[in-house]
């Protein structure tokens, strides 16, 4: 499944299985859904609170927190440490003399040095591109045949171990005809990104496809600079499988799903290269992207000014091939993903915007 890894870094990770995993006519039936229940280690490490879902919305994926909200004060010491790291820093700054306070407010540079700091004050963007209720829908086509839809949403804020987090949702679903004739996919990922530090705390993934069903949970513990990954999977070929991983990560690393949103924070000026860290599958990588050009993209919504970005991945200082991929971002403060084009071994995969709801400004 070489295609899966390459597509992952083209911000179309969830598409890969659609086209490269073979043919089937229906979704895999899971006789006992309990075998895919989230790992208890994850539930012990992470307390997630989300707003009550409005009628008709999809919130089941991240409803993995213990049911009793009042248990939150009794969370493990790890949770309390997580709160201490960011909150007292602000309080301490307020208690220091004015001169010291000025130095604290105006650091020499935004961390980490790898990342561009234009448009930021510390870790926070001067203009927040993530508006609650924002919904971007793409039509995904293969060999110019519509195969499915990609939806990227910003849902109401969540709390992860007591900290405010962006609730970023990605959902890929094949159309009925494609599911019956070729391959069926109904995959959903939620990335919970810390509001203040813009680092991923959690991602959860539910995979429902023709040849597999899968539940994935990941927790980035930046107190220990450690990534934790749990996966439970059922396939036609191998039955029930389970995978656990833990590895050391670098500060401010994104995961592959938060990266699609995180890249929208940068200015993407002409000819300038942008970079940030990504941790995935036991590896520490660097995402790099460069603006190739600015152009007007003709879409179903009409012409939209766009920035065309060419991404690449660096592993241990060396370029890691990910295929021929281009990403179109809206040329404004929001940097919506308008189009993704990826040439794979057989044909070209194209995902392009067909619907946009801007959401409510913060």
Image (cartoon, rainbow, N blue to C red):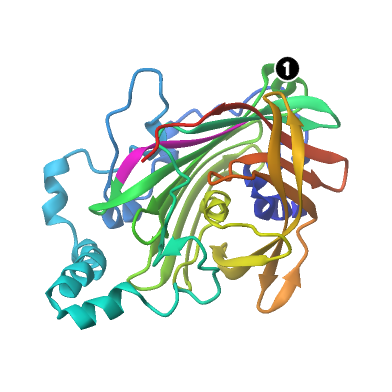
Q: Residue at (54%, 65%) from the top-left corner?
A: 279
Tell me if I can see residue 19 in this picture.
no
Q: Residue at (67%, 41%) from the top-left corner?
A: 237
**Magenta span has 88?**
no
Does 113 sit above or below residue 305? Answer: below
Query: Could you say where residue 351 lies in the image, as x and y percent from the top left?
Result: 71, 36
* SS under mark 1: helix
Query: Relative to the observer, which residue lies in front, 284 or 43?
Result: 284
Query: Relative to the observer, which residue lies in front, 275 or 182?
Result: 275
Does 254 sit above or below residue 190? Answer: below
Q: Residue at (58%, 57%) from the top-left corner?
A: 267
Query: Could you say where residue 250 lies in the image, as x and y percent from the top left?
Result: 48, 74
Specify the quadrant of the image occupied by residue 149.
top right
Tell me if I can see residue 5 in this picture.
yes
Query: Could you say where residue 79 lies in the image, as x and y percent from the top left?
Result: 23, 61
Query: Could you say where residue 311 lies in the image, as x and y percent from the top left?
Result: 71, 58
Q: Which residues are magenta?
A: 150-158
**Magenta span has 153?**
yes
């Amino acid at each position: 499944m070489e295609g899966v890894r390459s597509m992952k870094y083209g911000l179309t990770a969830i598409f890969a299985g659609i086209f490269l995993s073979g043919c089937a006519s229906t979704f895999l039936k899971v006789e006992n859904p309990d075998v895919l229940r989230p790992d208890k280690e994850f539930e012990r490490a992470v307390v997630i609170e989300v707003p009550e879902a409005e009628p008709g919305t999809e919130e089941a994926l991240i409803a993995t927190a213990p049911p009793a909200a009042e248990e939150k004060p009794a969370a493990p010491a790890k949770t309390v440490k997580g709160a201490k790291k960011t909150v007292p820093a602000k309080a301490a700054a307020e208690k220091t003399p004015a001169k010291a306070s000025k130095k604290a407010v105006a650091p020499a540079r935004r961390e980490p040095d790898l990342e561009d700091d234009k448009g930021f004050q510390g870790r926070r963007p001067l203009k927040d591109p993530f508006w609650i209720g924002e919904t971007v829908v793409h039509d995904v086509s293969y060999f110019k045949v519509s195969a499915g839809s990609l939806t990227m949403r910003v849902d109401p804020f969540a709390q992860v171990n007591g900290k405010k987090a962006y609730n970023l949702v990605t959902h890929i679903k094949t159309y009925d005809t494609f599911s019956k004739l070729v391959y069926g996919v109904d995959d959903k990922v939620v990335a919970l990104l810390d509001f203040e530090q813009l680092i991923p705390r959690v991602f959860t993934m539910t995979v429902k496809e023709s040849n597999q069903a899968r539940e994935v949970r990941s927790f980035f513990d930046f107190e220990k600079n450690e990534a934790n990954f749990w996966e439970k999977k059922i396939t036609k070929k191998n039955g029930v499988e389970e995978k656990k991983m833990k590895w050391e990560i670098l500060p401010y690393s994104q995961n592959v799903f938060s990266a699609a949103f995180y890249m929208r924070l940068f200015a993407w000026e002409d000819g300038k290269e942008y970079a940030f860290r990504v941790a995935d599958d036991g590896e520490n990588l660097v995402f790099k992207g460069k603006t190739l050009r600015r152009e007007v993209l003709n879409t179903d919504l009409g012409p939209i000014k766009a920035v065309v970005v060419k991404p690449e991945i660096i592993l241990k200082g060396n370029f890691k091939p990910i295929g021929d991929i281009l990403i179109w971002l809206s040329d404004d403060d929001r940097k919506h993903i308008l189009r993704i084009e990826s040439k794979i071994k057989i044909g070209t995969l194209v995902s392009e915007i067909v619907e946009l709801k801007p959401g409510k400004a913060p």
